[in-house]
Image (tube, coloured by chain):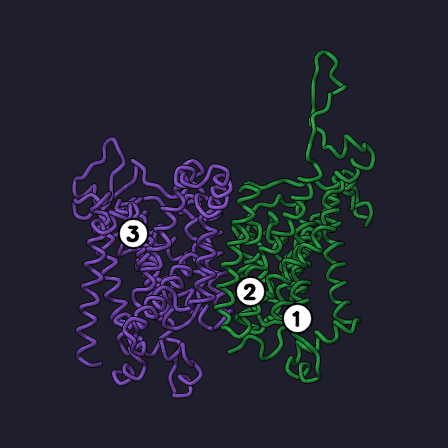
Chain colours: A purple, B green
Amino acid sequence: MNKFSAISDWVLLFAFAAAVYSMPIWLEPLGADYPDLMQRFAIFGLFAIGYNILFGLTGYLSFGHAAFLGIGSYTAVWSFKLLTMNVVPAIMFSMLVTALFAVVIGFISLRRSGIYFSILTLAFAQMSYKLAYSVLTPITNGETGLQLTLSDARVLDAAAGIEVTRSLPVTNFFGIKMSGMPGFYFCATVLVIGFFISLRIFRSPFGAMLRGIKSNQTRMAYTGLNTKPYLLWAFIISGMYAGVAGGLMAVTDPLAGAERMQWTASGEVVLMTILGGVGTLLGPFIGAAVIKYFENILSAYNTTSLTQVFDFVPEALQPIVVDVVSLFVGSGWHLTLGLMFMITVIFLPGGIMEGVRRIGSIFSRKKPTAAITSTPSASENASGA
Amino acid sequence: MDAIFLQVLNGLDKGGAYALIALGLTLVFGTLGVVNFAHGALFMLGAFCAVSVQKVLTISTKVRDESITFFEAYKEVPILEAKFPVVGGFIVDYSVPFSILLAIPFMLLVGLVMERGLIRHFYKRPHADQILVTFGLAIVIQEIVKHYFGASPIPQTAPDIVSGSANIGALVGLGDNVIYPWWRLIYLGFSLSIIGAVFAFLQFTTFGMVVRAGMQDREMVGLLGIDIQRRFTIVFGLAAVVAGLAGVMYTPIYPPDYNLGMDFLVLSFVVVVVGGMGSLGGAVLAGFLLGLVQSFASMTEVKSIIPGMDQIIIYLVAVIVLLVRPRGLMGRKGVMED
């Protein structure tokens, strides 16, 4: 790898960090500058970035990552209940426990590839979801969801002399309360760290190995390489990302429910990754942010607000226009999501990032060479292996 | 003994639904080589055919209620029943079976449009792309249904005459305490006959023979001057009809909501994979097998030994089958292997 790409990586990292931390400023005109939504951008961005390490680099389509999200959430809430309201141990535990699950699930699922791998991960996720709802109720609190209570032990907090008297305690980072903007900055920091690790993986010999597996696993095997450990590591790492994302969800709102583990939630992260651009560094985050943004904006509309928006339309046409548009917004925003997604897969398999690159190549009138977000070619990386 | 017999019936009945959906999925996969994640949505569309037929038939009018004489009371009666008391009442009562008449042409149309409009462009794309685009399509279909029919389940009624339970114990000589809902028995019979019809169609007609040949070696059939593509498109329509009919008949058992398809999709994919991708017999066998396994796992005796078994048994079986018999129960060599 030459010096230039190393520098451009640092530039990319700092640009990304700057963009993430300045979200409260530049999201203001878009009406999305409130902490709750920005936290979700960061959390789902992290989830998608991690998912991309598996799907984007190796091409293994997992339909079970929501299970890791749920496991991460449950672990974090238990850490809040039993140990301390400090978020650092909670995130650490989420990461470790999900890693354990990822080792087991990954080890079994990765014995097969293609659609069989998808079905195996799906089966494991569904098992986790069903068990969380039924038999594991003592751990997961079933349908109600796992919540904090006043009578929780909180051993470490008690030892430190922090007593809870009247209201439920708030998660904190060494005393800083993790609600509102501080919560966002915490999630953003974790996201930037996650992005940095993903960047390092993309540029490393390990990343090149994973891309080699994606393009031709058989050939990799013929060179005398055992591809399984690499795949398993990729699976575990992306599982840990999902676990941390789940932990962050519990940090911003200390409640864990089983519906987070349903397979449609796994589908959502696939949508994010594809929409943004699978296999690219920035794509998954952009996809996650776009989906969460539209979810938030579009689902806020209802018939009354639509009538106001289409005030300029002639009165006779107004009901028709409002009726048609109401299909796509409000509770029907999933329809927009589904259409958006289909259009992406059909016309732009590389997602938003490919769109950006195509537009860029029109203006630069050059051959579309590696933009800063695109991955360096395999040969470039193989030399470092 | 009684309990076991009941569980067998239960399992066969559940298995019937699984087998019908899995059969359609396998037909599409075996002919077009496309992994169709929207197949569950087709099942759901079939169920909503029944809902719409019932809605149309029961458009009501207010009629004076003769049974109340103290004051002027009105009750809602379907127009059809008010105008033609005998025939109309009969049609309203049998709305679910009558919906089949609507479902067949409608599902065929949906299937053909879907294949020509979307699936056709995805033959050569990777399986992951096929899964993703059909998954997107499933969301779209689901949301459109939700927009028009709402999000809550809409219960359907079986015709009066079969809405009760059959004293099946007496029929097979097991005593009087084995009873089972009539409609579920009808569903079992229905699914068996549809499965039989599909197999007969493939086995005994020229069209079916060509399709089977095309599944074996598509290129060779093409070289013989047969437009195999057109036949495969029709097969896709047929698979849509099978899924739709399974949906129509399922409505009295389980009130359909817009999410019905997604629940069944996951299960039927598991069924297909357990049976072996591309094997029609495998799909049917695995459907009934998993239905039986699931219903036996829900017995209290089993649940008391291994709690939660009924919730995960299907997935557990799938994992085990995939690991010890990589091609599924009846899978052929070289299908979906890389």
Q: Position of residue A236 (x, y in %)?
A: 35, 66
Q: Amino acid at mark 3?
A: Leu
Q: Please determine whether, in this image, residue A96 is positioned above or below residue B164.
A: below
Q: Please determine whether, in this image, residue B173 is positioned above or below residue A230.
A: above
Q: Which residue lies at the image location 76% right of the left edge and 38% below the top edge?
A: B160
Q: Chain of mark 2?
A: B
Q: Chain of mark 3?
A: A
Looking at the rendered image, the quarter that the N terminus of chain A falls into is: bottom left
Q: Secondary structure at mark 3?
A: helix
Q: Which residue lies at the image location 51% right of the left edge and 69% below the top edge?
A: A116
Q: Which residue lies at the image location 20% right of the left edge and 54% below the top edge?
A: A21
Of the image marks 2 and 1, the number of the one nearer the N terminus: 2
Q: CA distance from mark 2 to mark 1?
A: 14 Å
Q: CA distance from mark 3 to mark 1?
A: 49 Å
> Between tags 2 and 1, which lies in front?
2
Residue A135 shown left or right of residue A363 in the figure: right
Is residue B292 visible in the rendered image? The answer is no
Disc 2 target residue: B118
Residue A291 shown left or right of residue A80 in the figure: right
> Between tags 2 and 3, which lies in front?
2
Is residue A129 visible in the rendered image? The answer is yes
Looking at the rendered image, the quarter that the C terminus of chain A falls into is: bottom left
Disc 3 target residue: A248
Q: Chain of mark 1?
A: B
Q: Quick one: A262 or B37, which is closer to the camera?
A: B37
Q: Secondary structure at mark 1?
A: helix
